[in-house]
Image: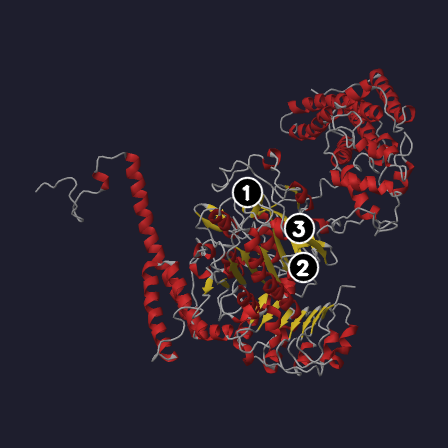
Amino acid sequence: MKQHPLCTDPDNGPTIMDLPIAEGMKAEWAELETRRHFLGRAGKVLGWAALASLSGERMFTGEAHAATAVPSPESLRLPHFAPKAKRAIYLFMSGGPPQMDLLDYKPNLAQLYDKDIPDSVRGAQQLTGMTAGQARFPIAPSHWAFKQYGKSGTWMSDLLPYTARMVDDLTIIKSTNTEAINHEPAIMLLNTGNMNAGKPCLGAWLSYGLGSMNDNLPTFMVLLSKLNPKENNQPVSSRLWSSGFLSSEYAGVGLRSAGDPVLYLSDPKGVNRDVRRKMLDAVNEINRQTYQELGDPETNSRISQYEMAYRMQTSVPELTDMSREPQSTWDLYGPDAKEPGTYAYNCLMARRMAERGVRFTQVYKRGWDVHANVTGLLPVLCQETDRPTYALITDLKQRGLLDDTLVIWGGEFGRTVYSQGGLTPDNYGRDHHPRCFTTWMAGGGVRPGITHGETDEYSYNVVKDPVPVRDFNATVLHCLGIDHNKLTYKFQGLDQKLTGTTPASVVTSLLA
Amino acid sequence: MMIRVKGPGIKLIWAASFLVSFLLLLLPFVFRLDGKTHADWQQFLGRFHPLVVHLPIGLILLVPVLELAGRVRPALLEAAMFVLSLSLLSCLLALTLGYLLAYGSGDAGAGVSRHMWGGIALTIGVLACVLVRLTTGGVRGFYPYLLACVLLLLAWTAHQGGSLTHGDKYLTEYLPNPLKRLGGMGTVQAKAFDFPDSFYARHIYPIFDANCLVCHGEQKVKGGLRMDTYDRLMRGGKEGAVIIPGKPERSILLERITLPTDHKKFMPSEGKPPLKSEEITWIRAWILQGASQEVKSLAGIDVPEPFREEPLPQVADYSKMMGEISQTAKAAGVTLVPVSRNLGDGLVLNTVDAGQKFGDAQLAGLVRFAPYIVEAELGRTSVTDSCFATLGKFSHLRALHLEGTSVTGAGLTTLTQLPQLSYLNLSGTQVTQAAIAPLTSMKNLRHLYLYNTPAQPASITRQAP
């Protein structure tokens, strides 16, 4: 019987090759077939190899270790050179703190109140949809006075009385700048080196490159601070602590700001630890079979994540149990620290994680997106963050942890010197501003008590020593013993790296 | 057929050659290279020297090739003579142009005269080759040896010339380090200053070194100015002093480096990159404030210290013990991880996973690897005061964490045997002021943490001396 040409009898029917399509397409298809076939087989072979190494490991340790077909941290042989910092804490001020109200002192602005910012200063800078329609761009001087502090004589806003006490420990960068003007691309660029989602973030690169210091806790942890509903909060999502194309075991593990720090971490009633262990062994066995069949490295990530969760069942309660913290801790961090999920609580938690060998902790504080009512919102934001930040640095310092911990403070961009919306003597708003913003670092690897970079008198353009995001991240990696050009991962035909394809350089004048 | 000149002809040729050689040797004494510039036409022609100079190089190198190949194909021997004669002509041309360049543009200095004498000697050498070959009629007698000498002389002279244009470190700068050591170039002598800490030595001289010394140094002395030592710099050049202390506006040096870049007298000349504005500011301030070779800092000038990674003291090679190390560590439930990819940086002992299960006995079990461990994280383990006896053997220890342990400080004195120990954390222990008193003798111990101990509030970070 003659078959219809498009009939799909899998055994005898016509194949793609019989179809009346271009020869080039057929060739491509043939190639794809071969590759798929090869990969299928290769996956199985690799799977066997991985299983063999797994069972080998188990004989010695009685523990499962994930073996992957992709380059492991051990094979990277990192750090590239002796690091100054072993771990890092990133205090992320999501929303974009206004630099000229906090750290970038511009005394001349007072005389320019309500004058328009010169076009020559503004140049061709793109505006957000929120101010693009404004007829005027009136200069809004900072509402707060500045004073000089410390041996370095650094100017600091009255809003930050606690930060002011530790200026001599800080490495302030006034010339950080970014290319993105909206939150999502900007925060993505800071975290992953790329405005588009899908690349691994700094913490994932660090976990991948440097590995864990404590087997019982994740290498990279994320602490979200509770929202203050009065503030203008921008969403942050797990894309920001994603491992991108790296194995998902390098992604950040978030602790919740309320209730159980990790959902479903505690065993339900009637399930004891033995039962849990037996269940996990069974699940791991099934996962291993799956890996053997399909060879997907993500299966191994799954196995290692189950094991991590099992170990976290004992380590996380110990980590989050603050009952043994002495009164001096609460005196230092302030009363907010007693309430789980506050920024103060998270700062204290970050210190406890540093003590326990967590490689990278990222604390997110949202609400800095002050488009309007700066004089109403900024004091609240500073009251929430100033003292805990100071407490964290001081605490790390007195415990001898600041020597090898790098602390980073900053948002995704800065804010405009001109007012968004109406400008009154008492209040103003500030729009997003990518051309300059102020960040600081402290601790292992950076030189304390210096200010790097300068902005013009409007805090609009960088006039000296610009630090683009890629250089900022290259410098962070350097402090942790990593050459940003050497920590790469082949993906989509490119040696991907945190700092991207534009050549980046370490800002050596920041280094100790 | 061999060319062989005989009879009175050859005598005449020899006589003429001696005369030419004599004139060549006399040349530097008649037209002395006095560091002054002369006629523009000389410089115009002279600047063809770097082009023409490659002709004799190529031709002379071709001669031995032809002489050797002539053994197989005799016709090439004839060509060798022809090429040798061409070499002589091109040598004379290159020498003339080179001399015009040096004389016209006022070049002088040790490197210039070495290159000059090399060129003259080479020309005479090639002339001698021609004569000997003509006289002996082929590759005979001492002609091959003479030719070999000429080739060596050629290499040396060419190298001198290259060093003049590119600087004398050009060739060896990227030489692989093992080869450098082999050639005895591993330890490049740092320049000796009378006042090595001065602003001049640290900030001004390096600017000159990077931008000026190629033409105003020992090797080449343009305009009679040498800037390679402070005394010579202050002596100035043929136009007199180039630096007038306290008077930057009257100092020729500053004037020349601040001219418009397309000005004829702008320095650095010949299209080399101009000085950075920061460097000019430093030079101006240095001259204004007395151009001293002694002062350490200048008012109003804050020079960021150039970033320099302190080299870490290295531990001995333990690469053969790697297997043993990781097995022992695994058995003790701890990790011994390299500080970095460079194994010489040492190992970090990390006990966080073992916690209280790690005690004095486990520490003692690692003592074999003690000389390789540079950092011991013993915080919150169950080690006691007896650990100090063991830790005394950790000869390369740089950082020691004992926070949250039950040590009281008895036996702490042992730590004074550790010369590199710079970080010691005793927070949350029972150590007392009396127990830590001996530590004051440790001059490398810069970070001592005593938070939450009876010895508080002396929780200090000692400043580096």
**Chain name for mark 3:** A
Asked if labels 1 and 3 touch by Cβ distance under 8 angstroms, the answer is no
Helix, strand or loop at disc 3? helix
Image: A486 above or below A299 = above
**Image coordinates for residue A166, horizontal then vertical, percent:** 68, 61
Helix, strand or loop at disc 1? loop
Return the residue at label 2.
A164
Q: Can residue A88 be seen in this view?
A: no
Could you say which is closer to the camera, residue B34 or residue A471?
Answer: A471
Image: A489 above or below B237 = below
Residue A180 is labelled as none
**Image coordinates for residue A400, horizontal then vertical, percent:** 65, 69
Extreme residue in the left direction: A1
**Image coordinates for residue B35, horizontal then vertical, percent:** 87, 29
Return the residue at label 1.
A502
How many numbered discs sit on the rendered protein?
Answer: 3
Extreme residue in the front direction: A425
Between label 2 and label 3, give the one nearer the viewer.
Answer: 2
Looking at the rendered structure, whether the residues under marks 2 and 1 are on a common chain is answered as yes
In which image quadrant can residue A235 be found?
Answer: bottom left
Residue A508 is labelled as 3
Q: How many residues crowd mark 1 within 10 Å: few (<14), some (14–19), many (20+)?
A: few
Looking at the rendered structure, whether the residues under marks 2 and 3 are on a common chain is answered as yes
How much space separates mark 3 and mark 1, taking CA atoms?
A: 18 Å
Q: Which of marks 3 and 1 is nearer the N terminus?
A: 1
**Chain name for mark 2:** A
Q: Which of marks 2 and 3 is nearer the N terminus?
A: 2
Residue found at x 48% / y 63%: A226
How much space separates mark 2 and mark 1, taking CA atoms?
A: 36 Å
| Image quarter of the C terminus of chain B | bottom right
